[in-house]
Structure formats: structure tokens, C-alpha cells
Image (cartoon, helix red, strand yellow):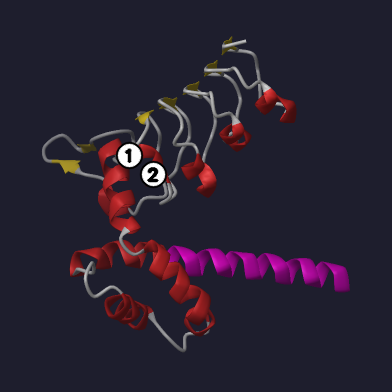
Amino acid sequence: MVTMKAEKCQLTGLPDTFSSLESLVHVDVSKNKFELFPIELRRMKSLKHLNLSNNFITLLPRNIDTMTNLSELNISKNLLRALPVEFTDVLESVNVTLNENPWTDLPPRWGKMWPNKRCTDGVSNGYTLSDAIDFLYAVRVFYATAEQIWQELGVFHYTNKLNLEDFLQELRDRLPNSWHEGLVQYVKHIYFEVRYTLLVLLVSYLFLLLSLLL
């Protein structure tokens, strides 16, 4: 089998054995009920055209950068909130269609207000595909270094012994050739998102611990 078309089949995923179909070149599973990107398809080296449009996918896995063997990837009209920084590798080698996703994890300032129209461009929250791509490439400049800093010093930031300015200074010191102050706005968003996520996880853990003790 070279082509599989399974539109409007109420699919929520693909079986593990699907990736053994080594001759598949075209897969169309649009207009289904996928909530997770089927990353197991990365093992299918013959796969060139993948259509996952009109599903319910909210996030892409970070190891999606292994799918650069594709020629076309359509993930338009899903519920994507943001893109992992690793997705830049896919964008640079694959023809990707991403329109009509909400991009709700981008910082609010990315919505562009049009004067006298009382509305923003793009979808209802004002974010456009161009905004999402611009944000992704800006973050790529510092993301790996920021991850390393957080692994080394994150506990001090979480306990307020270090703050955002300390984090920014670490980035300036470690990225002397690629850093510029225009990146500060992007770092702020990532920094506070990470701290908020860790706080939520800690509170959830404490509630679980209390429930076990009681």
C-alpha cells in the first residue's frame, strides 16, 4: 500500500503496527479526532505526505525534528497553542501548512490591534501564523542555553534567590556573539511560564501527598 486515505473516520490515533507499513508514501487522516501527534510515524522513512488537518492536536512533541524526511506536512485547523523550538528543523526542510491554529501560548503582545476596527488580525486572540513563526525563531537563539541555565540554577530562581535579571545576565555571558537585547521580551515569557508550570506541579504534588496522608 502506497496511499492511505482515512478522512472522517473518528480516529483518535494509529495502531503501533502502522509504522511497519514501509511502502506508505501518502497518509491522509484529516478530519478525525487526533489529540496527540502520531510521532511513531517518524520510523516510516518512505512517508512523504502527511495530512493531519482538522483534528484536535494542541501540542507537537519535541522529537518531531526527526521527521525531516517528509516532503509535506499539513497540520492546519488543529488546536496548536505554540510550536516546540525543535520544529524549526522541520520548517527548514519540509513544506508545512499551519494556518488556522489558535497560538494561545504566545504572549499577549503578539496580537496586533488595527485602529478604528476594534479587532485584531488573525483568529480571535489576534495571533497569526507569522507571529508564531517569528516567536519560534527568536526563541531558538537562546533556548538550549536557557535550558542548561535552568538545570544548573533553576532551584535558586524558584526559591527567589535569583531573579529574571540574573537569568538574563547568564544568557548575555554565555551567548556573547548571538545575544541582543531584543530577545529580552521572549526570555521573559519563557522564564515566567517555566516558573508558573513548576508551581502548578508542586501544588498538585502537595495535594496528592496530603490526600495520601489523610
Q: Which element type, helix, strand or loop, lies under badge 1?
A: loop
The answer to whether residue 35 of the structure is visible from this angle is no
**Which residue matches tag 2?**
89
Give me the residue at 50% from left, 80% from top: 152
Q: Quadrant of residue 9?
A: top right
Q: Is residue 8 above or below residue 125?
A: above
| Magenta part, dominant SS | helix
Give me the residue at 19% from left, 38% from top: 118
Q: Quadrant of residue 45?
A: top right
How far apart marks 1 and 2 lie (CA) works out to 5 Å
The answer to whether residue 46 of the structure is visible from this angle is yes
Could you say which disc has been placed on residue 92 in the image? 1
* Image coordinates for residue 133, horizontal then vertical, percent: 30, 43
Q: Is residue 173 above or below residue 136?
A: below
User: What crowding class fits label 2: few (fewer than 14 Cα within 10 Å), some (14-19), or many (20 or more)?
Assistant: some
- Answer yes or no: do the residues labelled 1 and 2 have beta carbons within 8 Å? yes
Image quadrant occupied by the N terminus: top right
Q: Which element type, helix, strand or loop, lies under badge 2?
A: helix
All told, the count of numbered labels is: 2
Q: Which residues are magenta?
A: 192-214
* Image coordinates for residue 196, horizontal then vertical, percent: 50, 66
Q: Is residue 51 left or right of residue 123?
A: right
